[in-house]
Amino acid sequence: MSYSKLDCPEILAHIFYPQAEAVSPLPPGAKDINIEMEPGVHIGCRFYLTDCDAPSILYFHGNGETVSDHDTIGPQYNEVGINLLVTDYRGYGWSSGHPSVATMFSDGEILLKESRRWLSDNGYTGALFLMGRSLGSACAIDLAEKFSDDIKGLIIESGFADTLPLAQSLGIDLNDLNIAEEDCFNNSAKITQVTKPTFILHGARDELIPAVEAEKLQSFCGAKSKEFQVVPGADHNSILAVAGKLYFQAIKGFIDKITGASSWRRRRKAAK
């Protein structure tokens, strides 16, 4: 699929806000990986690791964020028994290159492939899930549609269904650009082809991406097993702050159900 209509300077300036920064000190238990996208271009990734048999999440963050912004978040995933693999985009953090919509999607495919390879080579055997927040929801949905056999499930936080309403809220004038939804991220169409279990979280007071967008993703999602949770009082950037530890417990609960860790047989065995 071509994203050439989005990859013009006047639109890219609103989609991406790259923040370059030096490699920050590693939190305990974390590991940095640089993955080559093409000669001379790499994406910096930070893996917040716990047990080798724990489930792992490959995470695509929102705009205006970087890998190192998750240095206090990653360990909280570890506390509930999840490995978190956070990737950047071109030009973000210590990653090189310049971001575009087309390379964001093609880079995502490489990041999934190479993350799976790294986990396998280093003895991490747990199930792999995809997660995307805000802008990152587009990457996660795209990969979940294309590589269903490589993942166990999909998690979306503060994601969007349609690009055109979001573009208008960001101040992008599309009236003279002859752009249709099919020329854009097209999350609402892609998620109809997602069949793996899906968990969607959204802030009830999100004004940037209203909760109706999450409702649309939920209704269009092709998965037989899907969950939808609205966080009261939370806006676009405050779900974690409002929900606190319940945020991680909800994600862990979803993953446990999919992997069978919370099955009645295991609970009964643990109670003996």
Image (cartoon, helix red, strand yellow):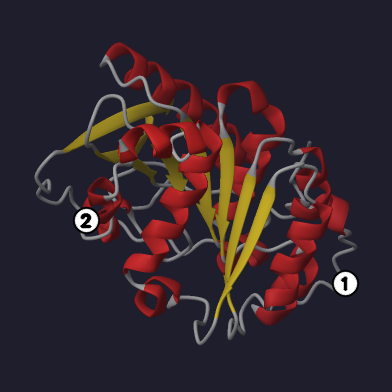
Place residue 162 in its image quadrant: bottom right
What kind of residue is marked 2? Asp
- Per the image, the residue denoted by label 2 is 71
Q: In the displayed structure, does residue 26 sit left or right of residue 189?
A: left
Task: Between residue 57 and residue 37, name the one nearer to us.
Answer: 57
Task: Between residue 158 and residue 69, name the one nearer to us.
Answer: 158
Q: Position of residue 57 (x, y in %)?
A: 42, 40
Residue 167 vs 100, above or below: the answer is below
Q: In the displayed structure, does residue 24 sit left or right of residue 189?
A: left
**Gap between marks 1 and 2, in whole Å?**
42 Å
Q: Position of residue 216 (x, y in %)?
A: 79, 64
Which residue is situated farthest in the top direction here? Answer: 121
- Per the image, the residue denoted by label 1 is 176
The answer to whether marks 1 and 2 mark residues whose Cβ atoms lie closer than 8 Å is no
What kind of residue is marked 1? Asp
Q: Which mark is residue 200?
A: none
Q: Is residue 159 visible?
A: yes
Place residue 168 in its image quadrant: bottom right
Q: Secondary structure at mark 2?
A: loop
Q: In the displayed structure, does residue 137 sit left or right of residue 3?
A: left
Task: Identify the image quadrant of the C terminus.
Answer: top left
Q: Residue at x 23, y 50 (%)?
A: 79
Q: Secondary structure at mark 1?
A: loop
Q: Position of residue 250 (x, y in %)?
A: 46, 58
Question: Disc 1 or 2, which lies upstream in sequence?
Answer: 2
